[in-house]
Amino acid sequence: MNIVICNDYQHMSAIAAQVFINCLQANTQAVLGLATGSTPVGVYQQLIESYKAGEISFAEVTSFNLDEYIGLHRDHPQSYYYFMHQELLNHINIEGQRVFIPSGIEENYGAYCQWYEDQISQAGGIDLQILGIGSDGHIAFNEPGTALGSRTHITELDHQTIDDNARFFEAKADVPRRAITMGVATIMEAREIILLATGENKARAIRDALEGPVSSQCTASALQQHSNVTFYLDSAAASLLQQK
Ligand code: PGA
């Protein structure tokens, strides 16, 4: 595992964006794993700039998002579909048919979750996956207690996640209680993974992920068993690490 402690959010976003830029320059048909949340927004801004400067193209790129709230339509401002289009996809030349974001409004999730897994396989697997981390140690919506062998599935959100995400909704009661998420095992199949975290409220999750036991109580700890993963942290998020 590589751990990079960055000066601040801007610095972290710039060096993480460079990993994407290098990937896209080496492989114009790259398959990207994308994440929502406030953490990756700076990376997406840098990618838009790099695209506008003509340094990278998304014309042949495929993307897969990690997760989506159950019950929100794609035009709901808090849906992850809406978020990804606002923050990145509307500003680059990616083809709509190569953008995969789990749907929050399916009737038959058993079949749909398998379909989503199949799409990832048929695209050849994910080359580069970006992750945030929840204050409860989740990656995507793999909440504490989720099997490390899990594939794409429906999950109940943890109280901690509902509290953390309430800031995006008018009231806590509006936060959906369920989500569809790639599983831990799905994420672990990405060929390269970068995880970004800033701020003191991520320090405990980062310590548990990097220095705790590999445990379903902190699903990010599964990344200890991945052969090509880099954590980009600011000093606050790294503050509880014993080995820096
Ligand atoms: P955040 O969310 O980037 O908004 O802190 C991270 C996550 O829950 O994975």
Image (tube, helix red, strand yellow):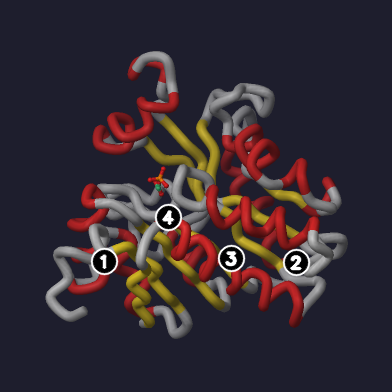
Q: What residue sits right under mark 1 in the picture?
A: 209
Between 44 and 138, which is closer to the camera in this rendering? 44
**What residue lies at 38% left-to-right and 71% top-to-bottom?**
231
* 234 relative position to 178: left or right: left
- Count neighbours of disc 1 (C-alpha within 10 A) and say few if under 14, some if 14 to 19, many if 20 or more: many
* Mark 2 vs mark 3: in front: 3
Horizontal and vertical percent for residue 64? Answer: 65, 55
> Would you say the beta carbon of the disc 1 residue lies within 8 angstroms of ligand 1?
no
Quadrant of the image occupied by residue 177:
top left
Q: What residue sits right under mark 2 in the picture?
A: 123
Q: Name the element at disc 3.
A: helix
Quadrant of the image occupied by residue 208:
bottom left
Which residue in the rendered view is the most extreme toward the bottom?
Answer: 227
> Would you say the beta carbon of the disc 4 residue lies within 8 angstroms of ligand 1?
yes
Q: What residue sits right under mark 3 in the picture?
A: 17
**What residue lies at 67% left-to-right and 36% top-to-bottom?**
86
* Mark 1 vs mark 4: in front: 4
Choose the circle earlier in sequence order: 3 or 1: 3
CA gap between label 1 and label 4 equals 12 Å
> Would you say the beta carbon of the disc 2 residue lies within 8 angstroms of ligand 1?
no
Between 100 and 46, which is closer to the camera in this rendering? 46
* Mark 3 vs mark 1: in front: 3
CA gap between label 3 and label 1 equals 22 Å
Q: Name the element at disc 2.
A: loop
Amino acid, disc 4: Gly
Choose the circle earlier in sequence order: 2 or 1: 2
Marks 2 and 1 in Cβ contact (< 8 Å):
no
Q: Name the element at disc 1.
A: helix
Q: Name the element at disc 4.
A: loop
Q: What residue sits right under mark 4 in the picture?
A: 132
Choose the circle earlier in sequence order: 2 or 4: 2
